[in-house]
Each structure stands twice: as structure tokens, then as C-alpha cells.
Amino acid sequence: NRDHTVPLSDEALSVLEMMKSLSGGREFIFPSRIKPTQPMNSQTVNAALKRAGLGGVLVSHGLRSIASTALNEEGFPPDVIEAALAHVDKNEVRRAYNRSDYLEQRRPMMQWWADFVKAADSGSIV
């Protein structure tokens, strides 16, 4: 495991603020339903997708694939996209020399993604 910093879009920050107010001062904004002193289980998103009728069609990792595809098609630099996905460069020499987290380049990319999702949700994107 290694640290991974994620620049959040305005929309993501709004969701976190709303959830914080609903969390009752708990340690986790998204606590486990069964054990509120623990974080939500990593499979919670997959369970929600199944409840939404998307079981067998979409899993949480597929959302990462959709984002990667859209960001690449929009022309964002591949290294920036890979950094956002927390992927490690397989080329050991390149990885040893390039230690950038591309944080500043990822900020506008994450906002673009939030805007894209919002437009898709409104039916503006087919």
C-alpha cells in the first residue's frame, strides 16, 4: 500500500460536505452499516450497482475503465490519467526517474470528469 492523493472536483467536495453533516461526527464519512466505527466495505459499490439492476453489467472497476477511456478520448495526457488511477509505471527505469504525481494537472482533469458525469446524468451526452 502507498499513499494516493486525489484532487477532488467541486461536486465531490459538495458530496463530502453533505455527508459530513449527516455523519453525526463519526470518524468516517462513509461508515460501515454493520460497524459504524469502521469504514465502508470495499465491495459496497458493487453491491449498490447490483441493487440498481446493473449486476453482471457493471462493476466498480468498470467505472475506472469508463473514466480512463473518456479521459483518453478527451486528450488528457496518458501519464496524468495513469497517475489518477494510481497505476505504477511498469518500466522500472522510467519509474525511478519520473516521480511526479501530476497533482496540478489532475485537478482540471478531475473537474472535467465531474462535469462530464453531470452532463451524462442530465441526458446531455449520449
Image (cartoon, rainbow, N blue to C red):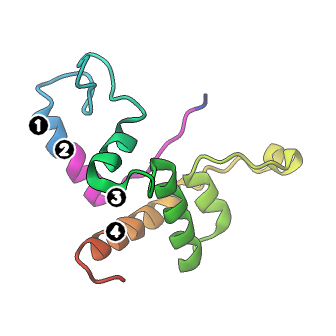
Given contact means CB atoms under 8 Å apart, are the residues at marks 2 and 4 in contact? no
Q: Is residue 67 above or below residue 83?
A: below
Three-letter code, disc 3: Ser
Which badge, 2 or 4, comes first in the chain's sequence? Answer: 2
Q: CA distance from mark 4 to mark 3?
A: 11 Å
* Residue at the outermost right position: 93
Given contact means CB atoms under 8 Å apart, are the residues at marks 1 and 2 in contact? yes
Name the front one of labels 4 and 3.
4
Three-letter code, disc 1: Ser
Q: In front: 61, or 100? A: 61
Asked which secondary structure carries label 3, the reply is loop
Which badge, 3 or 2, comes first in the chain's sequence? Answer: 3
What segment is highlighted magenta in the picture? 3-17
Name the front one of labels 1 and 4.
4
Residue indicated by mark 4: 117
Q: CA distance from mark 3 to mark 2?
A: 12 Å
Q: Residue at x 34, y 68 (%)?
A: 117
Q: Residue at x 63, y 56 (%)?
A: 82
Q: CA distance from mark 1 to mark 4?
A: 24 Å
Residue indicated by mark 2: 17
